[in-house]
Image (spheres, rainbow, N blue to C red):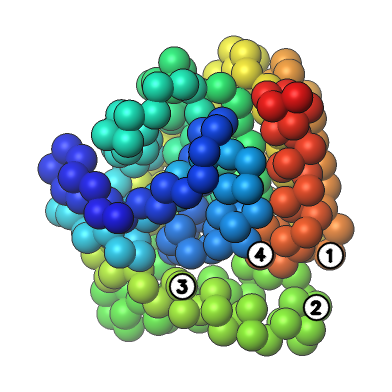
């Protein structure tokens, strides 16, 4: 369904009943990356999966998509859907950056966090420079050029040989991201603030998930988040890269379900 929020509208899937869980996708993807989770988790909870502005079926808007703006959008979605209880927020990569901003700005909306393939630190100078190059690449050669250059780092090496249909599906999802959506999100990620200062103040149960073969987020990042966040646990998913929820659906879903049942559902 399309929801009107603030200055725009967002596409949202809202499926199931019970504990609310919001799924926030990575860059440059959309809610379709969560299909295996929407199907499995909605059997026992209310799953809300959003297309961020400029991604998937949500139109692009002018200006930078700061992580704060995207977090406010997600908070507004929870309000418009009349979610009365705090939700478990599950963000992958850029979705994780947004989850930190959501916790910082709307802590009353957050019952728990699932941080997948993400990091608390801001971009290094080198990463900022790479974001600038990616923006130029989108302008000069179009979104396909960025998709082509990102793809090899998004998945574990064996996924390319063993699951070519998954690779094609991920390409198809990424190709739905608009040119201006891509640019606005790249600039938003480049300028995002460092979230390491809030880790010690996260007082909700937190599950950190890491693909053992992630080429973008090293395990050291996940370990340092786990060391800082008081009620957190870290699970490393074998034979998975950056898009671990799609590469290892069964292990990812089981880890999330175990966490939700232990900490929230009983
Ligand atoms: C993502 O998957 O959301 C991106 O790899 C995040 C990033 O580029 O920092």
**Are discs 3 and 1 less than 8 Å apart at CB?**
no
- Name the residue located 57 percent from the left edge and 84 percent from the top edge: 168
Name which residue lies at 13% across and 43% down: 7
Q: Which mark is residue 74?
A: none
Which disc, if any, is residue 158?
2
The disc, 1 or 4, on the residue closer to the chain's N-terminal end is 1
Pair 1/4: label in front: 4
Q: CA distance from mark 4 to mark 2?
A: 13 Å
Q: Check disc 3: other Cα within 10 Å, few if <14, some if 14-19, many if 20+.
A: some
Residue 239 badge: 1
Question: Mark 4 or mark 2: which comes first in sequence?
Answer: 2
Residue at 40 percent of width and 67 percent of height:
134
Which circle marks residue 246 in the picture? 4
Q: Nearer the viewer, mark 4 or mark 2?
A: 4
Q: CA distance from mark 3 to mark 4?
A: 12 Å
Left or right: residue 250 versus residue 183 is right
Give the vertical position of 240 relative to 208 (above or below).
below
**Residue in view at x 20 percent, y 50 percent:** 9
């Amino acid at each position: 369904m399309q929801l009107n929020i603030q200055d725009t509208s967002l596409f949202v899937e809202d499926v199931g009943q019970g504990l609310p869980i919001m799924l926030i996708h990575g860059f440059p993807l959309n809610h379709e990356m969560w299909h295996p989770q929407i199907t499995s988790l909605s059997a026992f909870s209310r799953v809300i999966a959003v297309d961020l502005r400029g991604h998937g079926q949500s139109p692009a808007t002018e200006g930078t998509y700061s992580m704060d703006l995207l977090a406010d959008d997600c908070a507004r979605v929870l309000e418009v859907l009349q979610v009365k209880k705090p939700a478990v927020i599950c963000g992958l990569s850029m979705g994780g950056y947004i989850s930190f901003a959501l916790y910082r700005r709307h802590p009353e909306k957050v019952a728990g966090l699932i941080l997948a393939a993400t990091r608390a630190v801001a971009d290094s100078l080198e990463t900022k420079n790479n974001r600038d190059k990616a923006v130029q690449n989108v302008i000069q050669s179009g979104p396909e050029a960025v998709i082509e250059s990102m793809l090899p780092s998004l998945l574990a090496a064996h996924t390319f040989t063993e699951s070519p249909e998954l690779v094609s599906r991920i390409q198809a999802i990424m190709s739905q991201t608009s040119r201006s959506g891509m640019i606005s999100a790249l600039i938003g990620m480049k300028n995002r603030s460092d979230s390491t200062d809030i880790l010690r103040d996260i007082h909700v149960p937190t599950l950190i998930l890491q693909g053992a073969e992630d080429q973008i987020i090293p395990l050291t990042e996940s370990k340092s988040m786990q060391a800082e966040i008081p009620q957190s646990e870290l699970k490393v998913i074998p034979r998975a890269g950056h898009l671990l929820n799609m590469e290892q659906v069964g292990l990812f879903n089981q880890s999330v379900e175990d966490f939700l049942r232990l900490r929230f559902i009983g």
